[in-house]
Amino acid sequence: MTQRREIARRALQCAAVCAALACIAFGVSRGESAVVLKKAVRICLECIGVAG
């Protein structure tokens, strides 16, 4: 019974990783990574007081 649970756990982990990678690929294909980077730079500049 524990071997079956281990297999089910591994399958669930694999499915979760595959779903995450698919979501990342979808976001990158839409250009969302550039938007996120632009927002991150803006936040960092505001934190150090360079940006208005």
Image (cartoon, rainbow, N blue to C red):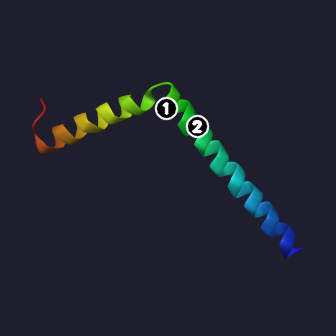
Question: How far across and how far down the image is residue 26, in percent?
Answer: 56, 31
Name the foreground residue: 52 vs 19: 19
Give the residue at x 30% y 31%: 38
* Figure check: 41 above or below 12: above
In-image side of 33 versus 15 (left or right): left
Question: How far across and how far down the image is residue 35, in percent?
Answer: 37, 28
Secondary-structure class at tag 1: helix
Indicate the quadrant where residue 43 lies.
top left
Reading the image, the residue beneath label 1 is 28
Q: Are marks 1 and 2 in contact (CB under 8 Å)?
A: no
Q: Which amino acid type corresponds to the residue marked 1 in the rendered image?
A: Val
* Figure check: 50 above or below 13: above
Indicate the quadrant where residue 22 lies.
top right
Give the residue at x 71% y 49%: 15
Question: How far across and how far down the image is residue 11, in percent?
Answer: 76, 57
Reading the image, the residue beneath label 2 is 23
Q: Which amino acid type corresponds to the residue marked 2 in the rendered image?
A: Cys
